[in-house]
Image (cartoon, helix red, strand yellow):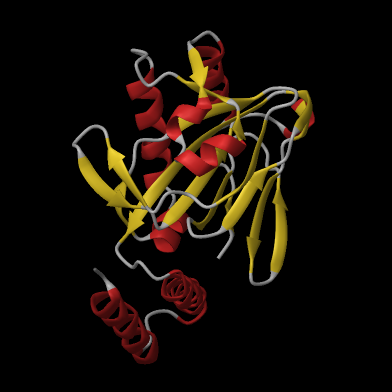
Amino acid sequence: MLLHIPEVLTKVQVQELRRILDAGAWVDGAGSAGPLAAEAKRNVQFSIESSDYPPLSQAIVTALERQPLFVSAALPQHILPPMFNRYAVGNTYGNHVDNAIQMDRRSGTRVRTDVSVTVFLSEPEDYEGGELVVDDTYGSHEVKLPAGDAIVYPSSSLHRVEPVTAGARVASFLWVQSLVSDAWQRSMLFDLDMTLLKLRSQLGNTEEIVTLTGHYHNLIRQWAK
């Protein structure tokens, strides 16, 4: 499931994040990739050693956790600390699949990556190229969203960032361990949840909707790990 979540951050929040990021320290992005992915990765990342990094990272988590669409789609159990990348002219990230297990540097916990999230921090007109391309069973999907919007997709997806040919693309990226590890099960639960919300707004809490809501929660109980 590929899900666009608009306005995760307000324009004012984006401006404040960018003000701090643009003045901060950036390091080679290959350091956070696996051995194979590092060969295809050409970008820079905001230094996680910077004193500015923890509050910036937490601001992304807080904004996402306030989004019902994100919670419904990801069913988050553990959110890894968001990081920030920048693609200047010539930078790119070739086809890759995200590492299945990553370390949460705050706690030392090993975390399974089920869901990937990119929060765009540059307006589409600020750069050329730089599209996120996600491949799934329905083909290739190019994503280039307004600043403040997020895209959510399975971490198992083959994806890439096209070369930037003008300007610069800045974004936050993160991974989530979901309560439900299977992407297809998460997709079905999300569709069921969205349908229940629509029916409830039209019909109220009828007996049938209460029953279906119970099935939704029982499916989570059955599939959660």
Task: From the viewer's side, name the closer residue of 142 and 161.
Answer: 161
Task: From the viewer's side, name the closer residue of 30 and 62.
Answer: 30
Q: Residue at x 24, y 47 (%)?
A: 110
Image side of residue 120 versus residue 36, left or right: right
**Image quadrant for the N terminus?**
bottom right
Q: Residue at x 79, y 30 (%)?
A: 125
Above or below, comparing residue 188 to residue 168 in the picture: below
Q: Quadrant of residue 122?
A: top right
Q: Residue at x 32, y 89 (%)?
A: 211
x, y percent for residue 64: 42, 44
Image side of residue 172 versus residue 205, left or right: right
Q: Residue at x 37, y 38 (%)?
A: 61
**Image quadrant for the C terminus?**
bottom left
x, y percent for residue 173: 49, 38
x, y percent for residue 224: 26, 71
Image side of residue 86 versus residue 201, left or right: right
Above or below, comparing residue 107 to residue 210 in the picture: above
x, y percent for residue 102: 33, 45
Which residue reaches farthest top?
23
Image side of residue 133 versus residue 109, left or right: right
Q: Is residue 9 visible to the viewer in this orientation of the structure?
A: no
Q: Is residue 37 visible to the viewer in this orientation of the structure?
A: yes
Circle count:
0
